[in-house]
């Protein structure tokens, strides 16, 4: 069976599955149960002050009765530091081979940051994660994403921590920024051993049509929250990939954002994450989702003949490039399998109204109609296969051309020469 152990910036873990700093890692009781269920690591709910919170806190975006997006306005831990430290110590004593990371947030004061680092390292954590990502509440007071949005603050506060830290330092970044590579680079310049991403995305889940209150609201008033869950996965995956292919980042990445199953785990690792963290999926379905994750990942690696999960880290990074490097002579077209088609015509409508008008409704020779793609006019946009409700009914197939691969830059050069 494939080896699921990972190593991230010197931190060893029995598997790549860590719980992200959030409600699932709020107490020793929870983290111990998570480890028993099979999670290899946990990043404790962020420690810091002040201890303050609100009700209500969460809202879900549901589609087809599945929660696809999740929003929260809660703050960091509202439990006293001593209580958290005592429980963290117990967890580490009971599970010495599991990974325990302390997530930290502090006001911009070097002395206080360093004091907190020493306190958590004294109880034997395996590493630190600096929370420069939470977008609400703490940010208004100069912490969380208020730091993560300014590269110079990220660099400075990381350096403060690195001055005293004895364990590896992971810097957790905010996605609420134009280009995450700049803050990732700043973290590295400050001495970060790894970066983790993403924290939550600024969001307002909705407005109640009857009361006109925001969703959620606190006694009739709302504030922006942090968005996460499956809906944010593409944003997170892109940010991981952008950092993974940036030579100026160059440190291991812990991937976070919308990860719900073993396939997501593989995708993040292929795109450069050395390990992953999960919050929303655990909140929605419980700790036992890790069983399917471990089994699915193991089977995948075994079927591919891959000995260690670390062997897949970054294997897709070279395949992610700039638009200008794409082959303009590559062509795919849609093919509709008449056998599967239920004649809902969604492909025809989508193509006719919003794409390239190349799916015709023609007689099928038996007194009925069929849908046929005019391949010479198809631009291979995929829209018909996306709207088709039947699996495998529309496939996109490559059409060989005689033309050699040619990028935009190469075509421009050919035109200009
Ligand atoms: C209710 C809630 C509370 C959170 N609290 C923290 C926190 O204290 N510290 C932190 O670094 N991230 C916090 N997060 C962000 C998560 O750790 C994670 O980065 C984010 O939810 C994206 O992962 P997901 O899509 O798997 O949920 C919180 C998320 C949620 C939903």
Image: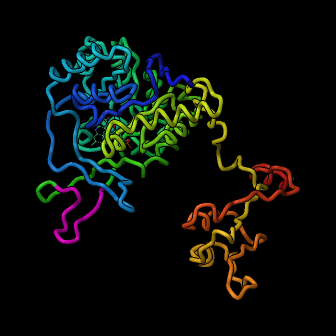
Q: Residue at x 34, y 14 (%)?
A: 96
Q: Does 382 sit above or below residue 87?
A: below
Q: Residue at x 27, y 52 (%)?
A: 224
Residue 398 visible in the picture: yes
Quick check: is 209 in the magenta stretch? yes
| Part of the protein shown in magenta | 204-217
Q: Residue at x 18, y 56 (%)?
A: 217
* Closer to us: 208 or 152: 208
- Where does the image place residue 192, in percent across and percent down from the top left? 43, 22
Residue 107 visible in the picture: no
- Where does the image place residue 259, in percent across and percent down from the top left? 44, 42
Snapshot colouring: rainbow
Q: Residue at x 61, y 64 (%)?
A: 385
Quarter of the rendered image showing ligand 1: top left
Q: How many marks?
A: 0
Quick check: is 44 in the magenta stretch? no
- Where does the image place residue 298, in percent across and percent down from the top left? 53, 31
- Where does the image place residue 166, in percent across and percent down from the top left? 36, 11
**269 horizontally vs 131: left or right:** right
Dominant SS in magenta: loop
Name, please, the residue furthest toward the left.
219
For the N terminus, give its image quadrant.
Answer: top right
**340 horizontally vs 80: left or right:** right
**71 horizontally vs 267: left or right:** left
Quarter location, residue 400: bottom right
Q: Does 302 sit above or below residue 267?
A: above
**77 horizontally vs 393: left or right:** left
Quarter location, residue 396: bottom right
Q: Does 122 sit above or below residue 414?
A: above
């Amino acid at each position: 069976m494939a080896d699921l152990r990972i190593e991230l910036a010197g931190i060893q873990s029995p598997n790549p599955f860590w719980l992200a700093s959030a409600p699932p890692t709020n107490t020793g009781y929870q983290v111990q149960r998570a480890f028993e269920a099979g999670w290899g690591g946990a990043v404790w709910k962020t420690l810091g002050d002040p201890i303050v919170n609100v009700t209500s806190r969460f809202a879900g975006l549901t589609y087809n009765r599945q929660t696809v997006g999740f929003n929260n306005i809660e703050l960091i831990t509202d439990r006293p530091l001593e209580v958290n430290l005592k429980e963290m110590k117990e967890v580490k004593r009971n599970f010495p081979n599991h990974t325990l990371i302390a997530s930290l947030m502090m006001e911009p004061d070097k002395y206080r940051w360093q004091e907190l680092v020493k306190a958590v390292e004294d109880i034997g954590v395996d590493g630190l994660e600096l929370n420069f990502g939470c977008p609400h509440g703490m940010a208004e007071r100069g912490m969380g994403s208020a730091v993560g949005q300014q590269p110079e603050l990220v660099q400075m506060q990381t350096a403060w921590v690195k001055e005293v830290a004895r364990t590896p330092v992971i810097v957790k970044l905010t996605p609420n920024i134009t280009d995450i590579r700049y803050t990732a680079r700043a973290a590295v310049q400050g001495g970060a051993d790894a970066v983790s991403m993403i924290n939550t995305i600024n969001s307002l889940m909705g407005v109640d049509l009857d009361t006109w209150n925001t969703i959620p609201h606190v006694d009739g008033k709302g504030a922006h929250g942090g968005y996460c869950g499956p809906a944010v996965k593409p944003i997170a995956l892109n940010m991981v990939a952008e950092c993974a292919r940036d030579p100026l980042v160059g440190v291991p990445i812990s991937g976070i954002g919308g990860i719900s199953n073993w396939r997501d785990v593989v995708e993040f690792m292929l795109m450069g994450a050395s390990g992953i963290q999960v919050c929303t999926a655990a909140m929605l379905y419980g700790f036992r989702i890790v069983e399917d994750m471990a089994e699915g990942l193991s089977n995948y690696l075994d079927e591919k003949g891959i000995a260690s999960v670390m062997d897949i880290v970054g294997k897709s990074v070279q395949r992610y490039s700039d638009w200008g490097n794409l082959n303009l002579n590559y062509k795919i077209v849609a093919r509709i399998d008449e056998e599967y088609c239920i004649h809902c015509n969604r492909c025809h409508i989508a193509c006719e109204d919003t794409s390239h008008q190349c799916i015709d409704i023609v007689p099928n020779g038996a007194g009925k109609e069929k849908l046929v793609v005019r391949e010479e006019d198809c631009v291979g946009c995929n829209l018909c296969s996306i709207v088709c409700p039947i699996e495998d009914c529309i496939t996109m197939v490559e059409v060989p051309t005689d033309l050699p691969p040619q990028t935009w830059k190469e075509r421009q050069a050919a035109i200009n020469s």
